Image: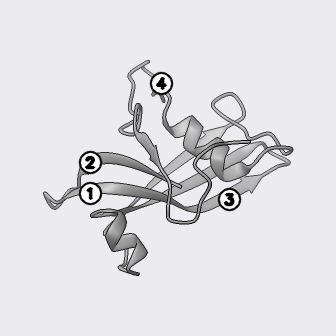
Amino acid sequence: MALLQPIQTQYGVELNYWKVSITNVDWHNKRLELVLAGYYDQASRINGKMPLEFVTFYFENADFFPDINLNLIEQCYQRLQSPIVDYNGNDINPFQGAIEIFEPGQPVERP
């Protein structure tokens, strides 16, 4: 599973395929660090190419905290497709409205 969303990097390269690379959950303090790895496209990822950029999000309990009984990665992708606002109320989420894409062999429907 990944997100399909064209985002231009600081170097002027447009990356289209974003995969959750790191999740770090602090269950006690209800904090989540989520890192997405950006690839040119799905074929680059499948063929073992290295990500060209990483995007990191930090969430605290009021923003988003995963349900321990559900799939963590799926919850992260769902959250990333929703608005994320800064302290001034501005939407700062470049992944809002991104399309979920599945890798070969993954089921295409959630249970």
Identify the element where label 3 is drawn: strand
| Residue bearing the label numbered 1 | 15
Dot 4: what SS?
Answer: loop
Residue 77: horizontal and vertical position, in percent? 56, 44
Point out the tag, 4 or 3, that comes first from the N-terminus: 3
Residue furthest bottom in the image: 48
On screen, residue 48 versus residue 102, left or right, reads left
Q: Nearer the viewer, mark 4 or mark 1?
A: 1
Q: CA distance from mark 3 to mark 2?
A: 24 Å
C-alpha separation, residue under disc 4 versus residue under disc 3: 23 Å
Label 2 sits on residue: 7
Q: Look at label 1 and name its amino acid.
A: Leu
Q: Is residue 43 left or right of residue 83?
A: left
Up/down of 25 relative to 97, above or below: below
Dots 3 and 2: beta carbons under 8 Å? Answer: no
Cα separation, mark 1 vs mark 2, equals 5 Å
Mark before the other along the chain sequence, 4 or 1: 1
Q: For residue 87, which numbered disc appears in the image?
A: 4
Q: Quadrant of the C terminus?
A: top right
Which residue position is annotated with label 3? 24
In front: 62, or 47?
47
Mark 3 to mark 1 CA distance (whole Å): 24 Å
Looking at the image, do the residues carrying marks 1 and 2 touch, with CB atoms under 8 Å apart? Answer: yes
Q: Amino acid at mark 2?
A: Ile
